[in-house]
Image (cartoon, rainbow, N blue to C red):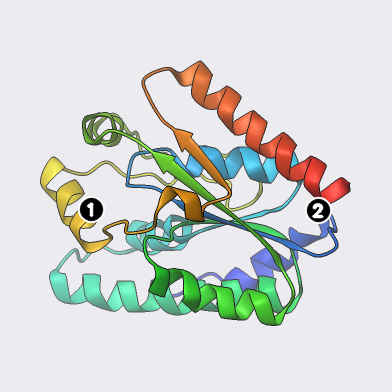
Amino acid sequence: MNKKNFIEEMEKDVGRVKEYIPPIAILITADAGAGKFQLARKLSSGLAIYLLSNDYVRNYFYQLSTDKSEDVGLEMQDKVSEVNDERVEFLISHRISFVYDHNIHNMDCYEEIHKKLHNNSFKIFKIRIHSDDNYNIKAIRERKMDYDKKDKAVIGDNVFYASSFSEDVYWQIKKKKNITLNDDWFDFVINRTDDEEKFKEDIHDVVEKIRNYMES
C-alpha cells in the first residue's frame, strides 16, 4: 500500500526549518472542524517550523485505495499510525521544531508524546481552540477535498487534505476523542466564532507571542 517514502520526503523539506534553541513543539487541542489545520499552517509559516499532520498520511492512503470496506479501513488506519509514529520520531530525534496537527484530547494522549519531547529537551507550547458544534459541523460540510491545492508558505504537510463527512460521523469522532483538558492547562486558548478576521488576528497574536518568547 505504501508507495511513498514519507521520511525521504521530509528530509527534502526540513532544511527550511528555523533552528530554535531549544527546539519547539506546538500541540493543538480542538474538535473536528474548529480550524486546527488553519492554525497549524499559520504557525508553520509564521515561525518557520515543520507542520506534521495526521490527515496528510491518512488521506494519501485513502486516495490510493479503491476498496472502502471496514477491514481495509482498519488496515489503513494501522498503517497511518505506523507512518505517523515514524514521522514524529524523525522530527524529535533530529530536534526539528514542529507543529503537530493532531487533536491532543486527553492527558494520556499528551503523555505519550510529552515523554519523547521531554527526553529531547523540546520547548512545548499547548494551544486550545474552543468552537461551537454547529460551527464545526457547518465547516466540515463545506469542505472541498483538493489533492492538488498547496500552501507554499508552509514547511511540511502543506496539502489541503480535509475531507467532508456527515454530522453523525462528527459526533462519533467527538465522543471517541472527548476533550478532557482544562483551559488553565494550556499556554494559549482561542475562541473560534463565525468572525474569521478575529480568528486570524488571534492566530497572529499567538504566533507573535511564541516568536517573542523564543527570541527573548
Q: Mark 1 sits on what residue?
A: 174
x and y, in percent, of residue 50 in the image: 68, 55
Relative to 176, does residue 159 appear above or below in the rendering? above
Q: Earlier in the sequence, mark 1 or mark 2?
A: 2
Q: Mark 2 sits on what residue?
A: 16
Residues at discs 1 and 2 in contact (Cβ within 8 Å):
no
User: Residue 11 falls in which quadrant of the image?
Assistant: bottom right
- In the displayed orientation, state which residue is furthest to the right: 216
**Along the line of sight, the residue nearer the viewer: 67 or 85:** 85
Name the kind of residue labelled 1 in the image.
Lys
Residue at (45%, 75%) from the top-left corner?
Answer: 2
**Along the line of sight, the residue nearer the viewer: 89 or 108:** 108
From the image, state whether disc 1 or disc 2 is nearer to you.
Answer: 1
Residue at (14%, 41%) from the top-left corner?
Answer: 167
Secondary element at image label 1:
helix
- Using residue 46 as the reference point, say whether residue 158 is left or right of it: left
- In the displayed orientation, state which residue is furthest to the front: 184
x and y, in percent, of residue 172 in the image: 16, 55
